[in-house]
Image (cartoon, grey):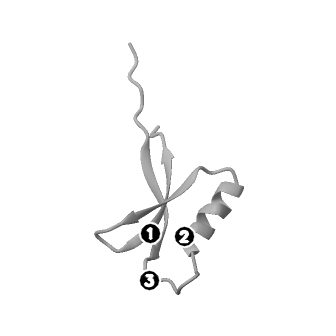
Amino acid sequence: MGTAATPTRTVLERFPAGAPRGSWPAEEYAAAQRALGMDAQVVMDLGSDQFLVVTDTIPQ
């Protein structure tokens, strides 16, 4: 019986939460990664006050 690999998140890039009003660099970076075929999402890391662009990957 095989074991299923559990997806883990990989941080692609970090952006400070204090971007100027109307500027969304994390969202723009994630959109560019999605355009390249990567399943990128933006999440907030409250501990470091940063937006993280992450993707789910399966360890090999």
Secondary structure of the residue carrying numbered label 2: helix
Q: Which residue is mark 2?
A: 26
Q: Which residue is mark 1?
A: 51
Q: Do the residues bearing badges 2 and 3 touch, measured as CB atoms within 8 Å?
A: no
Q: How many C-alpha atoms fall within 10 Å of the one at disc 2: few (<14), some, or many (≥20)?
A: many
Residue 27 or residue 10, whichever sits in front = 27
Which mark, residue 17? none
Decide: is 13 above or below 9: below
Residue 38 or residue 17, whichever sits in front = 17
Q: Earlier in the sequence, mark 2 or mark 3?
A: 3
Q: Earlier in the sequence, mark 2 or mark 1?
A: 2
Amino acid type for the residue under numbered disc 1:
Phe
Q: Earlier in the sequence, mark 3 or mark 1?
A: 3
Q: CA distance from mark 2 to mark 3?
A: 11 Å
Secondary structure of the residue carrying numbered label 3: loop
Who's the residue at 43% across and 77% down the image? 17
Who's the residue at 47% across and 37% down the image? 60
Amino acid type for the residue under numbered disc 3:
Gly
Amino acid type for the residue under numbered disc 2:
Ala
Q: Which residue is mark 3?
A: 18
Q: CA distance from mark 2 to mark 1?
A: 6 Å
| Residue 50 x %, y % | 40, 72
| Residue 21 x %, y % | 53, 85
| Residue 28 x %, y % | 62, 69
| Residue 11 x %, y % | 46, 59
Q: Do the residues bearing badges 2 and 1 touch, measured as CB atoms within 8 Å?
A: yes
